Image (spheres, grey):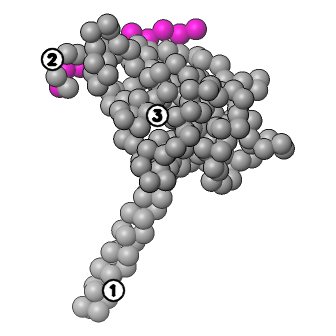
Amino acid sequence: MNLWRAAGTVLSGIAAIALLLAGCETTGDGVRSEGSAADTPVPSRARSATPTPSPSSSVAYKKVDARALLRKDPKVGAGVKKSLAKPCTADEYPIDVTYAPLTGGKAADVIVNVMTCTDSVGIGSYVYRKSSKGYENVFTSEEPPVYAAVSKGELEITKQTYKTDDAVCCPSGEDVMSYHWTKNHFREYVRYHTDYSKTGDSADPSATPSED
C-alpha cells in the first residue's frame, strides 16, 4: 500500500511540473524582442486597447541586420541614419528589434526602434514586411519621442508629450495609437491620450480615448 501511495505522489509531482513548463512556453502574440545597449524607453503607464483578433504566432522568425536595413532604406531620414554611423559603446547601437506577426505574411514582421545614445529618446520607429524582394518598409514614424510596440497582435505607437517647461526625463503625458493592417497598409483605429500626474507614480493618470 505504501508503494502505491508513494508512486501516486511522484506522478502527481511530475504532472504539476509539466503543467508549469507548458504555461511558461505560452507566448501570446508570438512576439520576440532583442534589446539594445541603451535603456529602452518603454512607457510605464497603464494602457487601454480595443480588443482585436490576434494573428497566428506560427509564422517563421529570422533575425535581420536592422542597422543595415535602416541605412539602405530611402524612407529613413538623414538624421536617424547619422545617429547609426557609430555605436554608442563598443559595437552596440541604440536599436531595439521586435519580431511579430502583424501583417498576415508567412514571415514575422520586423519592428525597429532607434533611440539616442545619451538619454534613450526614441527618434524613429519602423515596420518592415518580408516580400519576394527582401524587406519592405510599411510603416515609418520619425516624430520624437516615439516608440513602436506590439499589443494584442496590433501595432502600437507611443509618443510622449511635453509642455514647454518639461525636462526630457519628465513628459507631461503621452499619446498611444493602435494600428490594424488592412488593404496592404496600417490604419489607425483608436487613439488614447494620457496626462501624467505630477504628484507621484501612485496617482492614476486620466486618459481620454478618441476613435477615428
Q: Nearer the viewer, residue 96 or 148?
A: 96
Of the residues under marks 1 and 2, which one precedes in the sequence?
1
Q: Amino acid at mark 1?
A: Ala
> In the image, which disc is placed on residue 199?
2
Q: Give the image quarter of residue 9.
A: bottom left
Label 3 SS: strand
Q: Residues within 10 Å of mark 2 (few under 14, many from 20)?
A: few
Q: Which residue is mark 1?
A: 7
Q: CA distance from mark 3 to mark 2?
A: 28 Å
Numbered mark located on residue 43 in the image? none
Q: Nearer the viewer, mark 3 or mark 1?
A: 3
Q: Position of residue 65 (x, y in %)?
A: 63, 49
The residue lying at 63 percent from left, 34 percent from top is 127
Image quadrant containing the C terminus: top right
What residue is disc 3 on?
115
Chain part drawn in magenta: 202-212
Callout 3 environment at 10 Å: few (<14), some (14 to 19), or many (20+)?
many
Q: Residue at x 31, y 7 (%)?
A: 164
Q: Is residue 207 magenta?
A: yes
| Residue at position x 38%, y 76% in the image | 14
Q: Position of residue 106 (x, y in %)?
A: 75, 46
- The amino acid type, in three-letter code, at marker 2 is Thr
